Image (cartoon, rainbow, N blue to C red):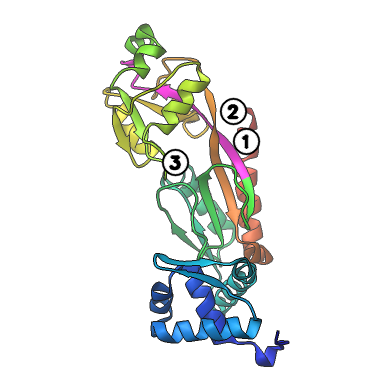
Amino acid sequence: MTHFSRATLPLNALRAFEAVARCESFRQGAAELRTAQSAVSRHVVSLERLLGARLFERRATGVRLTEAGRSLLKVVEPAFASIERSLNQLGEAPRLRLHVPPAFLQILAMPFIHEFQAANPGVVVEVASTYGTGVKMDGLDLAIVFDRARKTSFVRDLLWPIRVTPVCAPALAPQIRSAGIAALLESDRLLHVRVADEPANILWRKYATQANHHLAHERGVVFDTMPLSIEYALSGTGVALADVIMYADDLRAGKLAMPFDEVAELDYGYYLQTHPEAMETAYVRRFRAMLIARFARPFEQA
């Protein structure tokens, strides 16, 4: 295998490899690099020859990384991300690029972001917000993600595991309580929240299991976010599951009613996910420390 130095690094071939590996497609990788697919293919083939190893398994349905390809991507992808980040920051105000789930953003994150900017006036905060579990970290420094515990290549801090309970409009609570939890789980009143790659009733099903009940249907209304399901519940026409931590103020104020005492801790939670290279930046470390101090510790007794 060729011995490489900075003078002989095959940068164009590495760019082509990284784009194809990330997109899982020669066509999409070429489109991202704004070049011909044949040129990208030639670069990858030349890199494989230089390394003496196949980087992809070519299939009719697409490409798949080999073990050698996975090893190389672990090095190349963060290296390009770090270079991209550094070049973009030269000559302009420092930028912190953040992803926040819609529910977290609407209820908790906006005041915190304002406070961070007040304490760090020279930093521009760019916020993205999308639905679903997990998040792709392309172009991001940090992300608050709603997800299960999983092994990743990023720095992960658990802010809190969600603990849910049925909630409804206060006027509806006596009726729901009188009928009982079993009757509720058999009814069409359930308001569901969509979780990526899961059945529509996944959160209610997990709640039912922990409450020693069974949920066999998916009837009800399905929403993209928990705030939308809560808003619908407040109209008096359904029962939603609310995270008792996120909605603590509404529950204390009586805006939302809890017809039952059962609270279930699910295997989902809100995590702060930080790009390892971004940890080298002082304002990213400050944001991470402030966020953990604000959202992890105060909820330990919630």
Q: With respect to residue 90, does 254 lie above or below?
A: above
Q: Where is residue 43 in the image (x, y as percent from the top left)?
A: 51, 85
* SS type, badge 3: helix
CA distance for labels 2 and 3: 16 Å
The answer to whether marks 1 and 2 mark residues whose Cβ atoms lie closer than 8 Å is: yes
Does 161 appear in magenta?
yes
Identify the mark at residue 107; answer none if there is no mark. 3
- Left or right of 194? Residue 114 is right
State the extent of the magenta-drawn residues as a range.
158-173
Q: Name the residue: 64% across, 87% down.
A: 9
Number of numbered discs on residues = 3
What amino acid is at disc 2?
Ala
Identify the mark at residue 74; answer none if there is no mark. none
Q: With respect to residue 240, does 30 lie above or below?
A: below
Q: Name the residue: 52% across, 63% down.
A: 140
CA distance for labels 3 and 1: 16 Å
Q: Judge the density around disc 3: few (<14), some (14-19), many (≥20) Cα neighbours within 10 Å.
A: few
Q: Judge the density around disc 2: few (<14), some (14-19), many (≥20) Cα neighbours within 10 Å.
A: few
* SS type, badge 1: helix
Q: 183 or 58: which is nearer to us?
A: 58
Magenta stretch secondary structure, dominant: strand
Q: 232 or 145: which is nearer to us?
A: 145
Residue wearing tag 2 = 302
Which quarter of the figure has residue 82? bottom right
Residue wearing tag 1 = 298
Q: Position of residue 131 (x, y in %)?
A: 40, 48
CA distance for labels 1 and 2: 7 Å
What amino acid is at disc 1?
Pro
Q: Where is residue 23 in the image (x, y as percent from the top left)?
A: 45, 68
